[in-house]
């Protein structure tokens, strides 16, 4: 969702100042647009020290604070800019993104609607409105706003991508995949395509020539779309795959003998390239024709046996082993919506007869240190070195319960049972209203009823666990002892 500045306007300070105001502001704008945010922040601070209520300066200072991650400061600055005369479509379309980021969907929608009313022919205002409509799960309105934006600017990548997500979420894949191709043209998107004059593959056979596949986007995407590698190999027997080292062992299972490269300069000569996420479009995938040869990934038997022994020594006999992951990668663009906390799993942790096995990685794993509940928790996240370890652990669990992370895709690709806790507005791949997934037959979906409300989702999961495993305490039986978090010795 765009949030940024425009070329410097002609400014009139409210009080006389002894500095070259316009020139200083122009330097701040140039610094912000060049990504020199600390420099822009310092210059704007000098201006505000003299003219504290100058709306253009307040607004740009808010943009810079937002980009520096100081969201509370950004909101205060942007709201002051509007109060002091900056009630413009630009300011409103920017502050609506800030409200959205801070989890204030009603304020975000109000600002976006006001912006589009003030500037009905501004496609960026309409794009921002589409993003907010998606997050509120108002999908018809999201699509309408995105189409209005594209009618004004047919080459606006963000509006195409928002339309793609909404169409795919609704299961309208024919148009959705076409719109999804705009994802690499979004400003600021990571460069995941090779520097080449070779064409992107159109799906036609490439007899005797090399096709370069690219493991683009996040780990979960790569796991999900790697199922199409055998399909691509049927059309081009000579494949090379550009992928990170983390994905290499998984890719090898689907393409034995296929050359793997880590750097563009190591790629062999190739006739065409294609990102893995572009293969469903070429395949003509629809909701009822998803390639689903599950399982298409398997744990290494030796590692699975080693983890069976490890977990057998850590978990009390007779306990159901429930793997949990409560947070995704913090740098993910939608992490604030898709990630929960360990505390949100309290209804699950209160069940008798289960042991929780934490596969959590990253900063959120520290929450395991203060865990205290009925169910014992064994935290093995720190011992997981790679996805092969994760697969070996999943092979030894009764069930995985997780928010939307790559571990979910791994379990689904292995054909292991996994229950996914989804935010109110889920990623497009989980579709609308379903409790199952056509991508992964062994996955069950649990959805938020209201944005940010994880406890009720966990309560639904806990009730389903009682039914699945018969987790009821017999009359008169003593309750199970409380369990503390255990880090493996």
Image: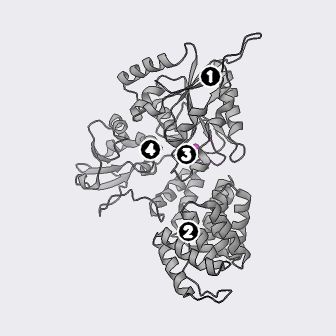
Q: Which residue is mark 4?
A: 219
- Secondary element at tag 3: helix
Q: Which residue is mark 2?
A: 64
Estimate the x, y position of residue 344 in percent, counting from the top left.
Answer: 66, 37
Chain-order first, disc 3 or disc 4: 4
Q: Which residues are magenta?
A: 422-430
In this rendering, position of residue 45 left or right of residue 84: left
Q: Which residue is mark 1?
A: 483
* Image quarter of residue 66: bottom right
Chain-order first, disc 4 or disc 1: 4
Q: Which residue is mark 3?
A: 429
Estimate the x, y position of residue 248 in percent, counting from the top left.
Answer: 34, 40
Which is more foreground, mark 2 or mark 3? Answer: 2
Within-10-Å neighbours for mark 2: few <14, some 14–19, many 20+:
many
Chain-order first, disc 2 or disc 4: 2
Which residue sits at x=55%, y=45%?
A: 429
Depth order, front residue of 304/194: 304
- Secondary element at tag 2: helix
Within-10-Å neighbours for mark 3: few <14, some 14–19, many 20+:
some
- Secondary element at tag 1: strand
Which is more foreground, mark 2 or mark 4? Answer: 2
Q: Marks 3/1: CA distance?
A: 36 Å
Chain-order first, disc 2 or disc 3: 2
Estimate the x, y position of residue 424 in percent, counting from the top left.
Answer: 67, 46
Quick check: can you spot residue 8? yes
Q: Residue furthest top?
A: 476
Which residue sits at x=62%, y=60%?
A: 71
Q: Marks 3/4: CA distance?
A: 14 Å
Q: Marks 2/1: CA distance?
A: 46 Å
């Amino acid at each position: 969702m765009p949030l940024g500045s425009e070329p410097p306007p002609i400014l009139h300070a409210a009080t006389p100042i002894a500095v070259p105001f316009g020139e200083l502001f122009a330097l701040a704008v140039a610094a912000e647009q060049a990504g020199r945010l600390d420099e822009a922040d310092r210059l704007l601070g000098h201006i505000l020290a003299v003219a504290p209520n100058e709306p253009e300066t307040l607004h740009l200072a808010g943009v810079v604070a937002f980009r520096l991650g100081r969201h509370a400061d950004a909101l205060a600055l942007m709201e002051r800019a509007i109060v002091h005369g900056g009630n413009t479509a630009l300011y409103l379309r920017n502050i609506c993104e800030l409200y959205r980021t801070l989890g204030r969907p009603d304020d975000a929608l109000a600002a976006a609607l006001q912006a589009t009313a003030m500037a009905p022919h501004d496609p960026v205002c309409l794009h921002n409105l589409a993003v907010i409509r998606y997050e509120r799960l108002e999908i018809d309105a999201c699509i309408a706003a995105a189409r209005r934006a594209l009618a004004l600017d047919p080459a606006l990548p963000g509006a195409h991508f928002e339309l793609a997500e909404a169409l795919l979420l609704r299961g309208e894949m024919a148009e959705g995949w076409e719109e999804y191709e705009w994802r690499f043209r979004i400003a600021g998107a990571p460069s995941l395509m090779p520097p080449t004059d070779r064409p992107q593959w159109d799906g036609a056979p490439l007899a005797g020539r090399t096709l370069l596949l690219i493991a683009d986007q996040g780990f979960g995407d790569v796991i999900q779309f790697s199922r199409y590698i055998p399909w691509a190999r049927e059309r081009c027997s000579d494949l090379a795959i550009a992928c990170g080292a983390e994905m290499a062992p998984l890719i090898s299972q689907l393409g034995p003998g296929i050359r793997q490269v880590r750097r563009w300069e190591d790629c062999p000569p190739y006739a065409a390239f294609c990102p893995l996420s572009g293969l469903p479009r070429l395949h003509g995938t629809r909701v009822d024709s998803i390639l689903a040869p599950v399982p298409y990934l398997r744990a290494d038997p030796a590692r699975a046996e080693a983890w069976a022994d490890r977990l057998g020594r850590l978990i009390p006999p007779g306990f159901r082993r429930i793997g949990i992951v409560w947070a995704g990668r913090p740098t993910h663009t939608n992490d604030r919506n898709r990630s929960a906390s360990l505390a949100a799993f309290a209804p699950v942790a209160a069940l008798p007869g289960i042991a929780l096995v934490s596969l959590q990685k990253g900063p959120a794993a520290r929450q395991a240190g203060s865990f205290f509940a009925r169910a014992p928790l064994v935290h093995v996240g720190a011992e997981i070195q790679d996805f092969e370890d994760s697969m070996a652990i999943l092979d030894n669990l009764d069930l995985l319960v997780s928010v939307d992370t790559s571990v979910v895709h791994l379990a689904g690709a292995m054909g292991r049972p996994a229950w996914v806790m989804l935010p109110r507005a889920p990623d497009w791949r989980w579709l609308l209203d379903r409790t199952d997934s056509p991508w992964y037959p062994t996955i069950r979906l649990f959805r938020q009823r209201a944005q940010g409300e994880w406890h009720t989702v966990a309560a639904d999961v806990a009730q389903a666990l009682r039914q699945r495993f018969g987790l009821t305490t017999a009359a008169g039986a003593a309750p199970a002892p409380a369990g503390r978090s255990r880090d493996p010795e």
